Image: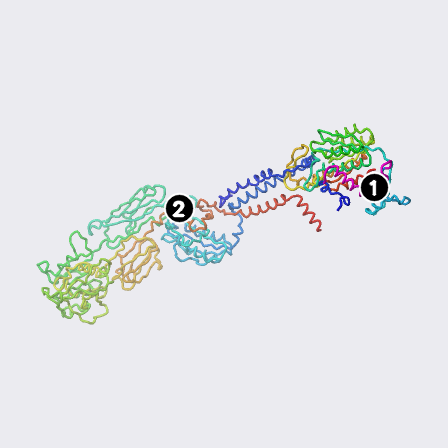
């Protein structure tokens, strides 16, 4: 079965070679599920799909989509704008978590997503910048549309360690300082430390006409707490330890987690911030497609 | 709370196991890196308190379950005076063993025993079965288990305590035998007793290995665990000096069975109905003191004698010692010498005199008086018991008449023959007295005949059981078969009448010794001589005993005497051969009721019986009518006393009955009288087992532990499952 004929399983993806190969494989898969732009290069940029309505030209109907979804969609295009996209990737210790049933760590997963999107943007001629952050260090790559720049971006993503504490606010501050013109800022994080202050930072970015999208990666174990028996839970960012029977805490924990997720989603909507939440056992293309379909 | 198996309480240490397991589990907790630890910590802060409480409760439940298990295995019980256990609701077979031995004569112990039995029966349920045995009878009063409780109440009212010692082991043996036939689920023995040392024989052991629950109910009041008791435990007496002096030395032994010294104890010696001497003695605790009386007895015949303690204690039975003094009464014999001689050894009575009166310094039971044929006329025969005719040729008419009266009135006549005897004259004069008429002399050999040993005959068969010959049948008895006879008197072959009997024959079957009953008296005929003329009998060892026995027999003296000190319950044997015709009547002590009279038939010249009471036993021959004093066999009068064992009123040790009990199970309750035994519960209380309740608690604890310990996820899943099914 060809990889392009199906969504890529993250586990299969893991078996592939370098980050570049993976990114390209991903994007090919993604693109095979979408109508390729008939306008290669130049000034025409695919804008979005809109549902077909009477009066529209039939030639713009995407028949492949129709074949898949049984609905008529019409591609709309807009002129190319000079887009700067920044991949802000959380490199803290908590991102290095991989539960027993999960195929990838959260870090690896978001790296793939970020790499695929970077590849996609670069392919479209957009400039892509990247930054990884944790409490101690931040690697920043300014946005560039040069083909060779992709290698730098992918190298940064490939080299993430997943250690230390999260400092999302500090990272956002850096981006705000560095991103001089209107940009698309994609933030990849598990958002465990997200708070009102962080959201207000995001709103500030939004007010500066940046497009901000949160890619919230979640391991399934975090929302189900599937453990049994007495467990010694160890924090990944130096929060210490907790000896407890998971059974005793599960109900309360799941409620807290749900509350946190709801608050995040609500706060994002309220601040007109894009918000995508996905699990590490979901197909990566699906995540990318969800982003691409909703991106305005 | 007490425990039957306290060793299991060591299991309480196992209560630490859950704590140790908890600590080990804590170390064994799975280490899990987790990113959202802050959320976990926040959640934990909110419910930490309830989790901790739950964990503590779980730990406590586990510890409690183990602790309760250890306690349950140790079989805990409490003593309670209320309620009954499920076991006790089941029908019970109860055998009451009531002490009825001599010790129950102490104070009011016997009425208390009767009352206690009634109370114990009152505590039973109508469906409980009972049997009743006493310790002095080999037959149970109620030998089969029955629900007729009233029968036991009636039976015990009829019983009086015996004078002999009770045998508690025998009672228990009977009880065990009765219970062995019972099918009821609960079985026990209730012993109502004073539990004195004397009630249980030393080293008494049960026959059966089966043990039963034994409930001991004492009739002693509180404070009666140690009781005062002085007892006369024996009397020794002997005549001092010659028979004529009649002074008796009587030594009485008095024992103090209590822990306190007794000072100035008054001892009375009573002979007949009169107190003849008094002594004061000090008896230290636990010691025996001997007190000596000396008294001169003028009266003739057996004397009822008692040494008694005055105002001693509440146990009257052993305060007196009964004994019978028999002043030696000699048989007065009148020897009629038919052939006196100035040469001593030729005298007809030379040998007989020496046999009946062996010499100075020796007290002979026979007092011989010698007279001639002529002298017989002048003698008052009433002063003699026996008349001996030794080779008397002829008697005067008056002498014959006196002899006839004498014999018919109860006197004894011994006839020895010799060369002067003319059969015709004898048959004519003494025909009414002779066992058989004389026929003529049979001369076998002259004394100096060298062939005499071949020609003579010897004494042959005798009536072994006859009082005269009984002594020859006993071990060590002298043989009479060695006696030779050179001549003897032939008798008419046919018996003259039914009153005569051959007691001894020669080897040629001719009669040697015969007897005849004439009126109230007896006549014995020796068909050979009393000296060496016709026989060598006088120089044989059998001569002296046979002549003595003949005199005693003719004088109606018994060979045996009531000198042996007897105790109740031990068989007494009396030799009555020659004294009675058909039966012996024994008047037992106590109230002069017809029931206190034993009528016994002699077997082989003896009667035996078992004395049941302390006191004097008078023996009568054939009839005990007071007007025939001759029938009163005074010399056979018995005195019977208490077994010294019965005087020991000290308490039995607590473990005395353990051998009969079930696995050494605890002593059961007393009814408020005296609780005896180290493990005995206080009065009126009983044991209630608690182990079943502990097991129930353990079950509840394990259930609670299961619910609390089950994971919430499992419970939720179960809940969902139930909800889904609905």
**C-alpha separation, residue under disc 1 versus residue under disc 2:** 119 Å
**Tag in front: 1 or 2:** 1
In the rendered image, residue B301, in percent from the top left (x then y), is placed at 25, 55
What are the residue bounds of the magenta stretch? A16-44
User: Residue most toward the top?
Assistant: A177
At a point 86% along the width and 43% down the height, the residue shown is A74
Residue A26 shown in magenta: yes
Assess disc 2: are there few (<14), some (14-19) or many (≥20) residues with their C-alpha within 10 Å of its C-alpha: some
Residue of label 1:
A36
Residue B213, label in figure = none
Residue of label 2:
B651
At a point 82% along the width and 38% down the height, the residue shown is A295
Rendered image quadrant of residue B155: bottom left
At numbered mark 2, what does the secondary structure look like: helix, strand or loop?
loop
Question: Marks 1 and 2: CB-CB under 8 Å?
Answer: no
- Please, is residue A14 above or below residue A198 in the view? below
């Amino acid at each position: 079965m060809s990889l392009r004929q199906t969504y890529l399983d993250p586990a299969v993806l893991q078996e592939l070679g370098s980050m570049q190969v993976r990114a390209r494989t991903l994007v090919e898969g993604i693109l095979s599920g979408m109508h390729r732009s008939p306008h290669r290069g130049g000034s025409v940029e695919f804008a979005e799909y809109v549902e077909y309505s009477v009066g529209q030209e039939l030639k713009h109907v995407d028949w492949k989509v129709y074949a898949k979804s049984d609905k008529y969609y019409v591609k709309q295009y807009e002129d190319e704008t000079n887009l700067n996209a920044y991949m802000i990737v959380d490199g803290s210790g908590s991102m290095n978590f991989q539960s027993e049933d999960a195929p990838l760590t959260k870090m690896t997963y978001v790296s793939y997503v970020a790499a695929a999107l970077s590849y996609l943007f670069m392919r479209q001629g957009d400039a892509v910048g990247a930054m990884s952050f944790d409490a101690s260090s931040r690697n920043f790559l300014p946005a560039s549309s040069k083909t060779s720049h992709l290698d730098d971006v992918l190298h940064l993503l490939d080299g993430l360690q997943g250690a230390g504490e999260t400092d999302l606010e500090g990272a956002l501050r850096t981006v705000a300082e560095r991103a001089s013109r209107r940009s698309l800022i994609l933030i990849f994080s598990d958002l465990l430390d997200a708070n009102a202050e962080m959201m207000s930072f995001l709103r500030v970015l939004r007010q500066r006409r940046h497009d901000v999208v949160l890619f919230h990666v979640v391991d399934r174990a975090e929302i189900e707490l599937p453990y049994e028996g007495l467990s010694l839970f160890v924090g990944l960012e130096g929060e210490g330890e907790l000896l407890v029977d998971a059974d005793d805490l599960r109900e309360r924990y799941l409620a807290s987690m749900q509350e946190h997720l709801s608050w995040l989603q609500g706060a994002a909507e309220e601040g007109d911030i894009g918000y995508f939440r996905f699990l590490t056992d979901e197909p990566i293309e699906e995540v990318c497609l969800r982003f691409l379909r909703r991106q305005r | 709370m007490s425990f039957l198996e306290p060793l299991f309480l060591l299991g309480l240490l196992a209560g630490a196991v859950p704590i140790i397991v908890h600590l080990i589990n804590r170390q064994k907790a799975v280490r899990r890196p987790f990113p959202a630890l802050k959320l976990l910590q926040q959640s934990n802060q909110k419910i930490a308190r309830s989790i901790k409480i739950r964990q503590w409760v779980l730990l406590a439940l586990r510890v409690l379950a183990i602790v309760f298990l250890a306690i349950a295995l140790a079989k805990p019980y409490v003593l309670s005076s209320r309620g009954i256990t499920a076991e006790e609701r089941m029908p019970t077979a109860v055998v009451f063993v009531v002490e009825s031995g001599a010790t129950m004569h102490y104070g009011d112990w016997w009425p208390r025993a009767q009352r206690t039995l009634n109370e114990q029966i009152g505590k039973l349920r109508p469906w409980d079965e009972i049997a009743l045995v006493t310790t002095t009878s080999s037959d149970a009063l109620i030998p089969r288990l029955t629900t007729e409780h009233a029968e036991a109440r009636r039976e015990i009212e009829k019983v009086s305590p015996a004078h002999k010692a009770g045998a508690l082991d025998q009672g228990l043996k009977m009880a065990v035998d009765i219970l062995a036939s019972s099918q009821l689920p609960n079985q026990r023995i209730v012993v109502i007793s004073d539990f004195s040392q004397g009630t249980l024989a030393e080293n008494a052991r049960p026959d059966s290995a089966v043990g039963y629950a034994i409930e001991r109910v004492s009739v002693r009041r509180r404070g009666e665990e140690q009781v005062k008791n002085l007892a006369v435990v024996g009397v020794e007496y002997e005549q001092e000096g010659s028979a004529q002096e009649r002074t008796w030395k009587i030594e009485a032994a008095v024992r103090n069975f209590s822990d306190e010294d007794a000072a100035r104890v008054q001892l009375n010696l009573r002979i007949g109905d009169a107190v003849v001497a008094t002594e004061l003695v000090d008896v230290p605790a636990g010691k025996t003191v001997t007190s000596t009386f000396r008294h001169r007895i003028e009266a003739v015949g057996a004397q009822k004698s008692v040494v008694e303690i005055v105002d001693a204690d509440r146990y009257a039975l052993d305060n007196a010692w009964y004994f019978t003094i028999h002043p030696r009464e000699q048989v007065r014999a009148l020897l009629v010498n038919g052939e006196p001689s100035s040469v001593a050894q030729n005298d007809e009575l030379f040998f007989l005199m020496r046999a009946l009166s062996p010499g100075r310094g020796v007290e002979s039971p026979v007092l011989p008086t010698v007279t001639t044929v002529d002298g017989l006329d002048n003698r008052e025969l009433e002063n003699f018991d026996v008349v001996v005719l030794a080779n008397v040729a002829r008697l005067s008419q008056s002498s014959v008449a006196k002899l006839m009266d004498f014999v018919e009135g109860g006197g004894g006549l011994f006839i020895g023959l010799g060369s002067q005897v003319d059969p015709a004259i004898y048959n004519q004069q003494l025909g009414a007295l002779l066992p058989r008429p004389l026929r003529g002399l049979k001369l076998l050999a002259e004394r100096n005949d060298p062939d005499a040993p071949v020609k003579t005959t010897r004494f042959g068969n005798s009536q072994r059981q006859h009082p005269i010959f009984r002594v020859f049948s006993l071990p060590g008895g002298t043989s009479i078969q060695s006696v030779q006879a050179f001549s003897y008197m032939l008798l008419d072959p046919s018996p003259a009448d039914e009153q005569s009997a051959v007691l001894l024959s020669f080897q040629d079957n001719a009669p040697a010794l015969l007897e005849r009953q004439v009126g109230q008296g007896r006549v014995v005929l020796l068909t050979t001589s009393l000296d060496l003329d016709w026989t060598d009998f006088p120089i044989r060892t059998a001569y002296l005993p046979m002549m003595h026995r003949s005199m005693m027999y003719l004088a109606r003296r018994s060979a045996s005497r009531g000198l042996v000190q007897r105790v109740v319950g031990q068989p007494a044997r009396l030799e009555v051969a020659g004294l009675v015709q058909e039966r012996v009547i024994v008047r037992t002590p106590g109230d002069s009721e017809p029931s206190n009279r034993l009528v016994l038939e002699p077997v082989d010249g003896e009667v035996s019986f078992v004395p049941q009471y302390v006191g004097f036993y008078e023996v009568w021959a054939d009839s005990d009518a007071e007007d025939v004093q001759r029938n009163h066999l005074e010399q056979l009068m018995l005195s019977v006393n208490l077994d010294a064992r019965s005087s020991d009123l000290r308490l039995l040790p607590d473990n005395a009955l353990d051998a009969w009990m079930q696995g050494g199970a605890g002593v059961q309750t007393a009814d408020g009288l005296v609780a005896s035994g180290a493990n005995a519960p206080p009065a009126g209380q009983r044991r209630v087992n608690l182990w079943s309740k502990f097991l129930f608690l353990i079950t509840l604890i394990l259930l609670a532990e299961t619910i609390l310990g089950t994971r919430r996820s499992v419970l939720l899943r179960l809940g969902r499952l139930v909800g889904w099914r609905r």
